[in-house]
Amino acid sequence: MLARSSLRTGIAIAALSALAFGVSAPAVARSSAGVGPFTSAALLYAGALCSSWAISGFGLRAPLGLLRRHGGRLLLIASLGAALGPAAFVWGLQKSGAASGSLLLNFEAVFTALFAWYWFAEPVGGRFGAALAAMAAGGAVLAIDGAHQAEVHPLGLLAIVGATLCWAIDNSLTRAVSEEPPFAVVAVKSALGAIMALSLARGLAEPTPRSPLQYLLLLAIGAVGYGLSLRLYLEAQTRIGAARTASVFALAPFVGAFVAWLFGDRALGWGGALSVPCFALGAYLHLTERHQHRHRHEALEHEHAHRHDDGHHQHSHVPPVLGEHTHSHRHDPLEHSHDHAPDLHHRHAHDGTDSQSQSQSHSPKDGHEH
């Protein structure tokens, strides 16, 4: 058995990402008042860029190398996830309010999970499906309740759903760069997105913040809710795959709605009460999920951030290296059994012909090929 459970660690990291992003939604609604949506998006991702560089020690080599290797893909990721998506989200929040707008973020998990299942054939069992359904039901109930409130604009709700679709496609496209340093992905995406959003804001002659404090608030929200949250999201995705990361991230709408309530938004009624058990059930199913079966790793050489206490990286260093580090390394053939998820080292197929369940999660025995 591994010293660490990549599945549970990844779920915890995804939950922290959801917390950071969920808190940012009502904060954006309050701080972007009177500011154009593309202008707000540019400031949010400028803040994300600052935080990613601060965390990484202000390095340039990794982001520039990433841009050379994946320039076209990163342009598409940035245009959807760091320009159009956040601008639609800000506009929707301004039209529909923080509580109702936060709740609709749940659709990002639904879209991302469906894309991961359809495009990448990520294995999902009954437990995962039940968790996703519970969270989707919680978001739907809250959204229906919010739609009946007089102050909620239907076009605002539709804009937020469109933003979640942009982010879901962004999540799926980002999978191809999951072996790259997460801070570099965040830095490049944030820089490109901020430039594109600022260009559109200037072209549309959008209103800008009325005071230096409003500038600073949007930058700070972007640093935590977009920069730090995205850094954690990418780390979780390398550990537990796109579908599970997105589903755990569905906690963000609940966090956002609760924070909006603390800020004085009392628009939610019966939907808020009915959603609590739905989200609680979804969180419980995720946190207690296990997926374990005997599988084989073929020989492989690649480069990505890794540790030596995960049961998969057994090469040595002189002198020894502790903690997370990055370099090109080789995996010798290995066969073992442990708790795992569809991360970088467990993207094998599951045919379901010889399966056993643990904690109500499917666990078929089959080979593992990179």
Image (spheres, grey):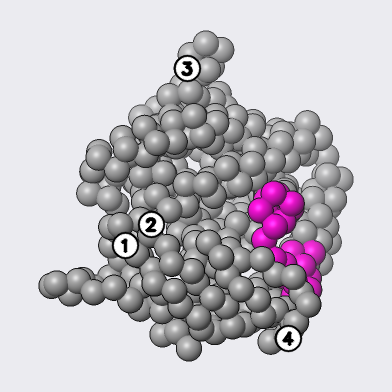
Q: Residue at x 64, y 32 (%)?
A: 88
In the figure, 165 relative to 236: above or below?
above
Q: Which residues are magenta?
A: 112-133
CA–CA distance in space, label 3 to label 4: 54 Å
Kind of residue at badge 1: His
Q: Which of the labelled discs sits on residue 356, or is there none?
A: 4
Q: Residue at x 14, y 72 (%)?
A: 318
Q: Residue at x 33, y 76 (%)?
A: 314
CA–CA distance in space, label 2 to label 1: 6 Å
For the stretch drawn in magenta, what is the main secondary structure? helix
Kind of residue at badge 3: Ser
Kind of residue at badge 2: His
Image location (x, y in percent) of residue 54: 27, 47
Q: Which of the labelled discs sits on residue 302, or is there none?
A: 2
Of pointers 1 and 3, the one earlier in the residue sequence: 3
Image location (x, y in percent) of residue 281: 73, 75
Of pointers 3 and 4, the one earlier in the residue sequence: 3
User: From the viewer's perspective, is the residue at label 1 or at label 3 nearer?
Assistant: 1
| Residue designated by label 3 | 199
| Residue designated by label 1 | 329
Horizontal side of 369 relative to 362 (left or right) equals left
Mark 1, secondary structure of its residue: strand
The image quadrant that residue 305 belongs to is bottom left
Comparing 325 with 330, the one in front is 330
